[in-house]
Amino acid sequence: MRKIMIVDDSQTIRKLISFILKQKNFLTVEAEDGLDAIEKLSTTPVDLIIVDLNMPNMDGIEFVRTLRNNYYHMDVPIIMLTTTKDEDLRKDALHAGVNLFLNKPINPDVLIYKVEGLIKGV
Ligand SMILES: [Mg+2]
């Protein structure tokens, strides 16, 4: 089974995304910010990462930059959660190595469509 990491400082959003993915038989692992995610990735390899943009300690863009500079995580697909207000930051996120964006509030069908599309592309 495919394992997906959800990185968000909101427990509500983590639980919501996890719930949607589990209904499609994905395994999930949660992290509360970029630092927590990097620590967990060192022992738990994943097939795809969904990451929030705004988080304390290490935000989404810094997290993606860090991953893309790491040999083991160079190619893992990454979806970033954004709001329509984050337009300027999307360019930075793409440059850092984000594959796709997902707008909040989350639409479950769009989430599954994007996750399955990216995983098939690997
Ligand atoms: Mg946040």
Image (spheres, rainbow, N blue to C red):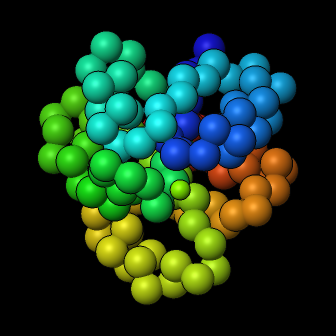
Q: Is residue 27 above or below residue 59?
A: above
Q: Residue furthest front?
A: 56
Question: Is 27 left or right of 122, judged from the image as shown?
Answer: right
Quarter of the picture holding the N terminus? top right
Q: Is residue 81 visible?
A: yes
Tell me residue 93's x, y (percent). 37, 68
Q: Is residue 12 above or below residue 101?
A: above
Question: Is 97 left or right of 71, judged from the image as shown?
Answer: right
Q: Quadrant of residue 71?
A: top left
| Foreground of the two, 108 or 57 | 57
Total marks in image: 0
Residue at position x 21%, y 47% from top? 66
Q: Quadrant of residue 103?
A: bottom right
Q: Is residue 91 above or below residue 39?
A: below
Tell me residue 98's x, y (percent). 40, 59
Q: Is residue 25 above or below residue 47?
A: above
| Foreground of the two, 59 or 117 | 59
Residue at position x 30%, y 38% from top? 35
| Foreground of the two, 108 or 86 | 86
Tell me residue 48's x, y (percent). 49, 36
Residue at position x 22%, y 30% from top? 72
Tell me residue 44's x, y (percent). 38, 16
Residue at position x 44%, y 25% from top? 46
Question: Is 21 left or right of 69, judged from the image as shown?
Answer: right
Q: Is residue 5 visible?
A: no
